[in-house]
Image (tube, rainbow, N blue to C red):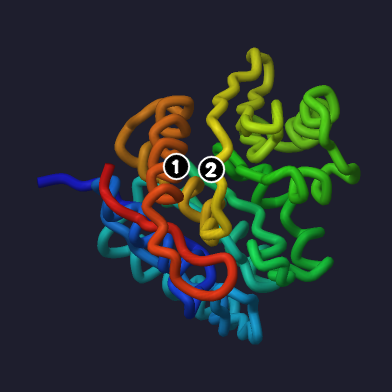
Amino acid sequence: MTIARVLIIAGSDSGGGAGIQADIKTVTLLGGHAMTAITAITAQNTLGVTGVHPIPAEMVIAQIDAVVSDIGVDAIKIGMIGSSAIVEAVADRLALADLAAVPVVFDPVMIATSGSRLADDATIAAFGRLLRRATVSTPNLDELGALSGGAPTTEEEIAAAASHLLAGTGNGAILATGATSTDQLLRDTLFRRGEAAVSWEGGRIDTIHDHGTGCTLASGIATGLAQGMSLPDAIGRARDFVRAALLAAPGLGQGHGPMGHRAL
């Protein structure tokens, strides 16, 4: 029996709604085998983050090496990265021959759903190396603005910001998430060098239990790529999974609660 092997490089969420915990649930329910290299331990719940402890960069690399040397990797998802030192170490490791051809999905996590900051300025400044290595990066509008030096809101501004990032990403794609096309519709748009943009729209789901949407989307895309799906098909299935999880949220906690991850 073969199964798609997905390595998740991300932080741990003690509340179980986002981070490694959401990633593992997503990969597993979509039929993959989830493996982890934890970059940071966070103390958080639905109300916010009360503590962050980055893991030493050499330990992050040791986790990656342990997985690669024995089990192997079909796709990689990168989420919360912890520190600029970890960014540099991970980028160096991804450049080595045994991972050079593996598809990478990069979710440039900066701020949690609760509003808590999860990346300092030095870490964000180092994100360029991961953007250049990624098969696709999945910034929301705030992250897209921070990475491109603007505050895009209109369709034209989003396209310009994505084009700015594409100019420095080599062959990597940008999936700009969470744009509002109307009061009731949200749009995600895939931008690729030399190709027409592709968009997906869906009705806005009225809920505060949306913690972990970005993590879940990126892990879902990585699982699809690991299973041999095209990038648009992987995105489409991952979006469907996120929407199902939002609708199935159990309503836990007093703030932005976890989604209800379940098989489609």
Mark 1 / mark 2, whichever is N-terminal: 2
Question: Which amino acid type corresponds to the residue marked 2 in the rendered image?
Answer: Ile
Residue 205 at what x, y percent from top left?
Answer: 53, 43
Q: Is residue 236 above or below residue 206?
A: above
- Residue at 53 percent across and 52 percent down: it is 213
Where the C terminus falls, by quadrant?
Answer: top left
**Residues tagged 1 and 2 counted as in contact (Cβ below 8 A):** yes
Q: Is residue 23 above or below residue 231?
A: below
Please indicate, yes or no, whether residue 102 appears anywhere in the rendered image.
no
Q: Which residue is mark 2?
A: 205
Q: Is residue 131 above or below residue 175?
A: below
User: Quarter-wise, where is residue 16 in the image?
Assistant: bottom left
- Residue at 41 percent across and 26 percent down: it is 233
Question: Which amino acid type corresponds to the residue marked 1 in the rendered image?
Answer: Arg
Please indicate, yes or no, whether residue 202 appears anywhere in the rendered image.
yes
User: Quarter-wise, where is residue 223 in the image?
Assistant: top left
Q: Callout 1: 10 Å neighbours few (<14), some, many (20+)?
A: many
Residue at disc 2, secondary structure:
loop
Q: Which mark is residue 243?
A: 1
Residue at disc 1, secondary structure:
helix
Q: How far separated are the C-alphas under marks 1 and 2?
A: 8 Å
Compared across the picture, whether 246 is left or right of 204 comes to left
Residue 62 at what x, y percent from top left?
Answer: 45, 75
- Residue at 70 percent across and 35 percent down: it is 179
Q: Callout 2: 10 Å neighbours few (<14), some, many (20+)?
A: some
